[in-house]
Amino acid sequence: MRTLRFPIEQPMAALFAICMGGTGVPPVAHGQDARATQEARAPGTHDSGAFRDAMDYAQKRCARLYGGGAGREHGYATGLLVSPDGLILAAQGIYLSGESLRVVLPDGRRFEAETVRRSEKLQAVLLKIEAKTPLYFNLAEGARVEQGDWVFAISNAFNVASVEEPLSVSLGIVSVRAEMEARHRTQDVPYEGDILLVDAITSNPGAPGGAVCTLEGKLVGMIGKLFQSVNTRTRINYAVPVDMLQRFVEGKDDEEPPAPPDEAPPKGQGAYVGIRLFKLSGERAPAYVDSVAPGSPAHAAGVRKDDLVLAIGQDVVRTCREYEEAVAKLKSGQDVPFLLKRGMTIKTVFLTLAAKPEKPK
Amino acid sequence: MSRLLAWCLLLAATCAPAGAAEQEADPRLVSKAFRAAVARVLPSLVTIESYGGVAPRPPAPKAKGAPRPRRRIGTISKPGEGPTTGLILSSDGSIVTSTFNFLRQPPIITVVLQDGSRHVAKLCGRDETRGLCLLKVEGVKDLPVPALAPRGELKVGQWVVSMGVGYGGDAPALSAGILSALERFSGKAVQTDANLSPANYGGPLVDIEGRVVGICVPLAPGGGAAGQGVQWYDSGIGFAVPLSDAEPILARLRAGEVIRPGRLGIQPQPGSAPGGGVVVRDVLKGSPARKAGIEAKDVILAIGDKPVRDLLALRVLLGRHVAGDTVSVRFKRGDKEQTVPVTLEAGDEQIPQPTPLVPGHHPPAPKQP
């Protein structure tokens, strides 16, 4: 855990301090009364460490979860207390599928948990225990953060913290908020929406369900299920943003049931483009244009032989196979930009798609 | 304590004038500083898109029935296919990035600048010892070039921030950390504990003033195949190649050269000779050492003006040179000392790595010649 006690020896930071006009000294709490009022809401910074109070606050609102493990999947995780009557937010995982799911609260009380609701989109689950939990994260008071803001991640990573001990804490900054294509082992995951990437290390067994908070103790997100980025094939450190969690807990996110199979578009649909690709190099070769049908949408837009298709609309087209997949999604009547490489220049042309011509019988 | 008194004290504390260096910096100011530093470099950041190419294959198994090696680079099963990161180095379109981003050897490379324009890029030279390569984009001018942090001003413990577009999205992902060490891999790289990974390899490591300290690359001891070092992604151990003193290398890359590790072509005795130096066990046929007249049983005493105490020192000193460099090698044959110039050639020196120490285990005895 990095310490934040550093003097201003870097010129830019000093300049900032002077420009801000303030001391940078956090407000000092005096006496028991002030402390007691601070406990009831998210505390400010404390002069014995930039985020000691925030950490204490978060420790009291995270629970340990123990369930069934299987093979390489671990049977332990973390959870967030989100209501005064025992609602707990956690990440989906194998540990949920055992016969029982035990919750250990920060004060040591143990309960069995029931599942209330799941979210495929957020890969999250809402649990309930029969207990009063007066100390909890109020999701409506979640914080919005910017890139570069300090956050800490608190969880039971590796189940290191024995029951009487506080959970593990890792410090970092907000890396970026982005939509993420992710995968778990070899499968793409159904997660939909933004994630908050952080550079605190959260991608460890037992961490999912933990809290990511600002230095003021405000919840920023819940550590998500362990995933790899499709782009980099590395494990990603991220949190599910609190605003998305709030909608899930309040039952406000519209979970659309998956489309039944007979609604999938029949094979052979898709629009007519009029491009034939050079296929001799195989499906994984870049999508070079071999010929353009006269009178076709591609012909009208000015696509030429030997052009390389780089992207169709928002879809990057790296190979012939990706080209086919992108074209299959198109509908006749659409105006679609095709990004092309012609020689050493890049061009965008717009195709007005037509309906597929009837095949001669 | 009454509420009123508490509020007065609060007000007094925030109105008190800023002290000098004893003041502790508010972490929020550091966050603002990170954002400002990143904003300075952002105009020069580019997104690289690669088209085509194949995932590198591992070497075929040697023996029948030997387990098939899994397709791995470090612990990444294949290089990703997403966008990668680069940095503009010249206003007419020279872009630096990491060789890691082209392991698939894509035939087509495009770059997207911060103004949204997309250009075809040509791969120029590459430096295999540093994991750096240069791209060139034509038909552009007045591109924004970032400021470089002079290497001599770098300090262990200073803040640095990495920037990378590998996860996708509109803004680069940031990771903050400190400089952990200033000289790694025979002076080729600095070390940081910021999270470095394929998400930002090829991108800049930036100081708090918005100057580029270096380019993030995967590196590992012992050289080896391109991409080695990626197994340490996000581990707290990351490397960046400083640019402020890299002009000689960059000039060669602009000219399209491939810079490779250089070797003498000797097989050394393990350990060191009594009194210091490295005993040559064998000189490989046709090697630079053979051409320079070095023979078995010679004891290598110095490379240039730096003494060679042992194998480790020899490896570090040779690591400062690349194939094509001519180094002067001082050695002793019997009682006589000589110095000869040796022109290093491409290849890996057969210098064994130090055995890693494992608590509770004894290191294996060195193999006898």
Image (tube, rainbow, N blue to C red):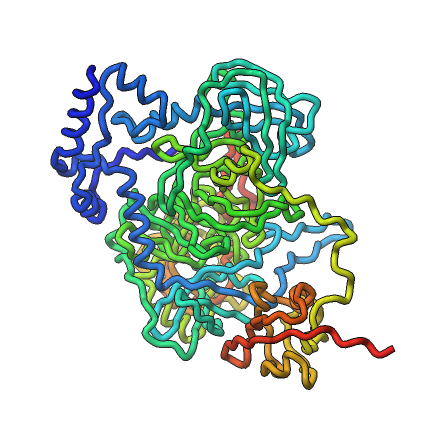
Q: Residue furthest bottom?
A: A294
- Residue A265: % across, % down: 74, 59
- Residue A288: % across, % down: 64, 76
Relative to A328, B338 lies left or right: left
- Residue B316: % across, % down: 40, 52
| Residue B243 higher or lower than B366, as above or below | below
Kindly tell me whether residue B301 is visible in this rendering: no
Quadrant in which residue A312 is drawn? bottom right
- Residue A260: % across, % down: 75, 48
Q: Which residue lies furthest to the right in this view?
A: A361
| Residue B174 higher or lower than A105, as above or below | below
Residue drawn at (81%, 76%) of the image = A359
Say which quadrant the C terminus of chain A sits in.
bottom right
Residue drawn at (48%, 25%) of the image = A62
Kindly tell me whether residue B325 is visible in this rendering: yes
Relative to A44, A103 lies left or right: right
Residue drawn at (64%, 56%) of the image = B58
Comparing A195 with A284, the one in front is A195
Comparing B95 with A256, the one in front is A256
Residue drawn at (59%, 23%) of the image = A128
Comparing A194 with A107, the one in front is A194
Q: What is the total number of numbered labels drawn onto the structure image?
A: 0
Quadrant in which residue A94 is drawn? top right
| Residue A31 higher or lower than A221, as above or below | above
Say which quadrant the N terminus of chain A sits in.
top left
